[in-house]
Amino acid sequence: MLPENITAVVSRNERWSGDAASEPYEAGWAHEAVFFVRALKDPVGKMPKGWVEISPDGMHWVPEGTEFAMPLQRDGIAVARLKGFGNWLRVATRFEDGAECTVLVTLHLKA
């Protein structure tokens, strides 16, 4: 039996600044999840840490505990790996004033 897996694009060509987050994704069926955050353009300003958030309903969010450094240059990629995460997932970050990054965020799930 082949494992069930899926790749979902949860943010595409979005300019993140201030408080930013990917679209939520319902992933309760999966045992493993990997987020990839790619900078599509050279980031502007100081790049913050990003983090994974979980939710019971896709509307109310809490930090899961996994953090990653946002990409520092165009085509740079950040990665966050997860197991045992519940149902809803997203990544979030908070930029300082004047900082921004245009991102492509994909979520890879495996049963």
Image (cartoon, helix red, strand yellow):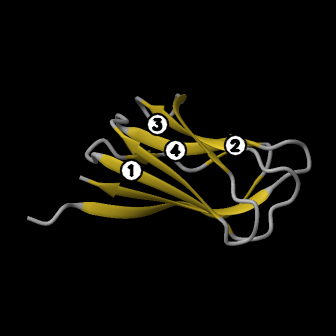
SS under mark 1: strand
Residue highlighted by disc 4: 90
Q: Measuring 76% from the left and 70% from the top, which residue is drawn there?
A: 41
Q: Cβ–Cβ below 8 Å for labels 2 and 1?
A: no
Residue picked out by circle 2: 49
Q: Secondary structure at mark 3?
A: loop
Q: Nearer the viewer, mark 4 or mark 1?
A: 1
Lower sequence index among marks 4 and 1: 1
State the CA–CA distance, disc 2 to disc 3: 22 Å
Residue topped by disc 3? 58
| Alpha carbons under labels 4 and 1: distance apart | 11 Å
Q: Is residue 93 above or below residue 107?
A: above
Q: Residue at left 33%, top 63%?
A: 6
Amino acid type, residue under disc 1 in the picture = Ala
Assign a secondary structure to mark 2.
strand
Question: Residue 81 at x, y = what percent?
Answer: 44, 48
Above or below, 104 relative to 89: below
Answer with mark 1 or mark 3, whichever residue precedes in sequence.
1
Residue 13 picture quarter = bottom right
The residue under the point 58% across, 50% down is 22
Which of discs 2 and 4 lies nearer the camera? The answer is: 2
Task: Report crowding for label 2: few under 14, some 14 to 19, many 20 or more residues within 10 A (C-alpha).
Answer: some
Q: Are marks 2 and 3 in contact (CB under 8 Å)?
A: no
Vertically, is 111 above or below 97?
Answer: below
Quarter of the image holding residue 109? Answer: bottom left
